[in-house]
Amino acid sequence: MNKGISRREFLRSSTALAAGAAGANLMPLTALAQDGLPFEVAPEAMNPLGLESGANVEGVFFEGGFGRSYIDNAADIFRALHPENEMSVEGIQQVSEILRPRFIAGNPPDVIDNSGAFNIPMDSLVADDQLADLGLLMAAPSLDTAGKTFGETLFPSSQLDGVFDGRQLYLNVAYTVSGIWHSQSLFEEMGWEYPRTWAGMLDLCETIKTAGIAPWTYQGKFPQYMVFGCLMHLVHKTGGMDSIKAIDNLVEDIWKSDEVLQAVSMMHQLAANEYILPGTEGLTHTESQAEWLQGNAAFIPCGTWLENEMRELTPEGFKMVIKPVPGPDESSYESLVAWPGEPYIVPKNAANVVGGMEFMRCMLSKANAQFFAKEISAIMPVFGGSEGVELSSALTSALQAAEAAKGGFNYLSRGWYSDLWTAVKNATGELLTNRIRPEQFAETVQAAADEVKADGDIPKYTHE
Amino acid sequence: MSININRALAAFTKKKYHIIIPFTMPSLALFLVFVVYPYAQAMYFSLTKWRGLTPKPTYIGLANFEKLLGDAFFWNALKHNLIYLVSIPLITIVIALYLAFLLTHGRARFRKFYRITFFFPQVMSLVAIGVLWSFIYHPTIGILSSIAGFFGAPEPIAWLGNPDLALGAVGAVVIWQAVGFFVVLFIAGMDSIPASYYEAATIDGATRWDLFWKITLPLLWDTIRTALVFLAISATNMFAITQTMTQGGPNRSTDVLSTYVYERAFLSGKFGYATAVAVAMFLLAFTLSLLTMLATRRESVEY
Amino acid sequence: MTKRAFPNASSSAPFSRRLRQLASHTVLNFSLVVWALLVILPLIWLVYSSFKTDQEIFFEPWALPGALQWNNFARAWVSAYIGQYFLNSLKVVIPSLALTLALSSMTAYILARFRFPGNRALFYLFMAGMLFPIFLALVPLFFLAKELHLLNSFLGLTLVYTAYSLPFTIFFLTGFFKTLPSELHEAALIDGANEYQVFFRVMLPLAQPGLVAMAIFNFLGMWNQYILPLVLMSERDNYVLPQGLSFLLHQQYYKSDWSALFAALTIIMTPTLAVYAVFQSQIQKGVTVGALKG
């Protein structure tokens, strides 16, 4: 059974978006609070978890790039569905500092968006057994997709990283793919074509450099963008899913294996051949992305949030598109990292666990996913979530790439072993500024992996 | 013994305690309740394994401190603190003394203007300073790069992206920000030195340089000492500015103990270990401040 | 001030000496000008940048705005609730400042001027309070405030701000009181004043420059204090300014709407500048008052 999103599901969403008119049956969302729900709800899907009337739900959410309108919209759906239950929505930024005392005191909120730079590490929450098992929710009927369970309405590969020892402990609300971005307008103007192999990439880089443009830039001070936007793709292309899983499972000397070393060396060629915009390492993510938008560099790695993040700075007529990272040969061209994000949790010790789960049913409903696609230009991992919504060129290219990659792959240990990925990030920065060689990279990162493996305080998980 | 007790009792009923007790107790009470008590609790965490999520940390004795000794990232951060500790107070105080002396005793025009202006960096919030300097240090459009380019640097310089430059670049911002406050501080100190001292010395033919060394510096010594200790304390902290500008990067080249503590506690979820690092940092800062105080000690006037 | 300046070189001085003085004069003034530019240009840059569009800020950071973008300020005002948080900040900062200065000056005076067993211990205890990172005390502090029913209370935040400002203020003022001449104190006692009178009528006015320096220092620290209100003020109605600013700052990470952030920074900075300018003239007044009393 293919774990990725089925080709048909993607075709369905893309054809629907082409038709456009399919959205006409969506009622205006403002009508929701007064007139009840904008969609039909089957009787068995009204309250499958048994939420008691009068049991209020307290939600505290990270309010970042996606804003809070989609949260309010989900809360409105919840309120229409359960008029007897009050739902509160609070937006915060410093999740870790603000919510830790409440966890310690044993009265955390009922549902939390644990995202942003200052989130509570998921590995800690899991290790301290603070999260409710969402199994009942996954098996409950979907709110607005008739005949399916809630779990069946979600892209299958999108919630894997939230599974710990067979229990679903968090749910990703955003679905992003990452890869390499370029400006279609610039490429058409210069007559360049996006390469299908890494050798082709290097050739094109040479051409671009001759034309007086830096071929690459990356989010300098945050080299992790090159990890999830380039390196891990290359590892998948050289060593396949086996190498990815071996990294997740801390297999001995995996970072020194031929496959991984080959991938590291491929990435290193960008630095060795001086294809990277000089000074890149001193830029922040927005600064480097701004350089790219100005046409000072041709390629930049990033996830699908790039468009929304840089909206204010994008010049008129700049057509941004995302493509997979080319591999050693054409056969591996399509694969890419599909990165589900914006994880939501329901704390085990919350006063109203059922209420928190019921809110998640509204959050990841098809109606809210469509709101998300329309208002935030981002994708929820919900089937039919982009139906009837007109998507931008960036998002369209992302969906096409994801479809071609059959949903893409993900590496899971990011949420398990934060120390390992900090080491990978730092070593990547050193590699891309030619301060270390690929062999030293492998050495450094393997040492960090060994340390994680030897640390008895860090719970270990397996990527099956 | 009884004589001693009597003497002690006599001492306590001495008149000066009528002012000592009411003048110190309120501060002490507030300080003990809101500062010492939470810190003492926090310090206990250094002896535990704790992720900062449950009410009951697991006691593990000194294991965190043992681990600390072998932690290369800890020593790396400590090294950066020590570099700051030597450079920042020295440079800041020299610049601030120089400017303050010029403003009190020079014949500079627009004194008031300078006094207000020099303080500007203190008024800017850290967020503003972080944003501002990231534009100044910007490799392609930053002012510093343009200057370096003017003098023939072949490539844009990534001030905050180069591990060899980043530490100095962050330190420079701290000095830039701190000088203004110490100028104001030294001016206040210099103003409280009676003018008659200078007048007498000037009549005796002293140069301005003599005045600085023989009158200003000795009489300002307590203030300078205060400044030194304060700057030493900031140099052992450096949290806010480092977090704003580099988060300790690139590749830990600007990591200081406080950012490392923060990373361990909030990003890795190792509160127990992080607190152990903080306790080590506290002991270091306390010892150093104490040494500074003792080394610069001088008999103070007392009534 | 003029009475403190050195006598001007008389016109009868030898020419070479005058030339030398002129040269050194120029060098001295030059260093003042250079430092002034180093600190004033960034501030000016910040203010005019707050009138620019995001594209202008990012792509031409040093250029002047093409057209004044007043709506940056409107956005900052609305989305960061600057008006309300501004009042909240005042409600905490003003009483905290008064309390800090009152308590610290009394304690510092004692530590500087009286010898008694435990004097040094007390001094070092307060000093130790400066040496631990605040963020590690957050969790215990939250529970303490909860026990005392001081969560989401302006009184609670005032007490906490004051407690955390005491160490440095006491530390600084102790040094300051030591620099004051002792003759005045003795003279006052001989004149029949009691210790309280000496403190309030003689020493406190003399310490005014130091108090003003600490008032400014603490005002800035409290005005920009972010981490303490974060856990102690969790209700949106009670937020203080830095919490509003933090919201805008975090938005930048995802939306690159720098112009609103710059506008908010300008709005927040203006009162601090005004306060400083006012206090600045107070320093000189303080000196005069002290001199008159003396």
Image (spheres, coloured by chain):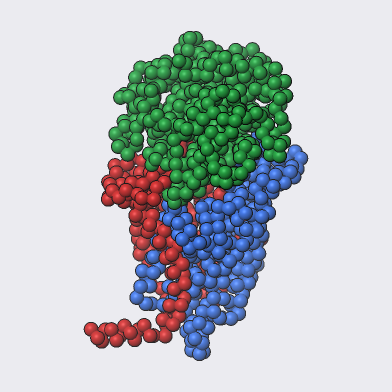
Q: Position of residue A252 (x, y in %)?
A: 30, 24
Q: Which of C193 and B25 lies nearest the eye of the viewer?
A: B25
Residue C59 position (above or below residue C47) = above
- Please state the total of marks drawn on the protein image: 0
Query: Residue at 50% across / 71% down in the picture?
Result: C103
Residue C6 position (above or below residue A29) = below
Q: Position of residue A348 (x, y in %)?
A: 44, 41
Q: Which of C148 and C89 lies nearest the eye of the viewer?
A: C148
Residue that protrudes farthest toward the right in the picture: C67
Residue that protrudes farthest toward the front in the picture: A43
Q: Quadrant of residue A38 in the image?
A: top right
Residue C188 position (above or below residue C161) = below
Query: Residue at 39% across / 50% down in the picture?
Result: B55
Q: Quadrant of residue A28 in the image?
A: top right
Colour used to depict chain A in the structure image: green
Colour used to depict chain C in the structure image: blue
Q: Position of residue A385 (x, y in %)?
A: 61, 25
Q: Quadrant of the N terminus of chain B?
A: bottom left
Side of A216 where A420 appears, left or right: left
Q: Quadrant of the C terminus of chain B?
A: bottom left
Q: Quadrant of residue C129 in the image?
A: bottom left
Is there any visible trace of residue B34 in the rendered image? yes
Colour used to depict chain B in the structure image: red
Q: Which of B192 and A308 lies nearest the eye of the viewer?
A: A308
Query: Residue at 61% across / 62% down in the picture?
Result: C91
Q: Which of A51 and A461 lies nearest the eye of the viewer?
A: A51
Side of B120 where B219 appears, left or right: left
Query: Residue at 65% across / 22% down in the picture?
Result: A387
Q: Position of residue A192 (x, y in %)?
A: 61, 13
Is there any visible trace of residue C266 in the rendered image? no
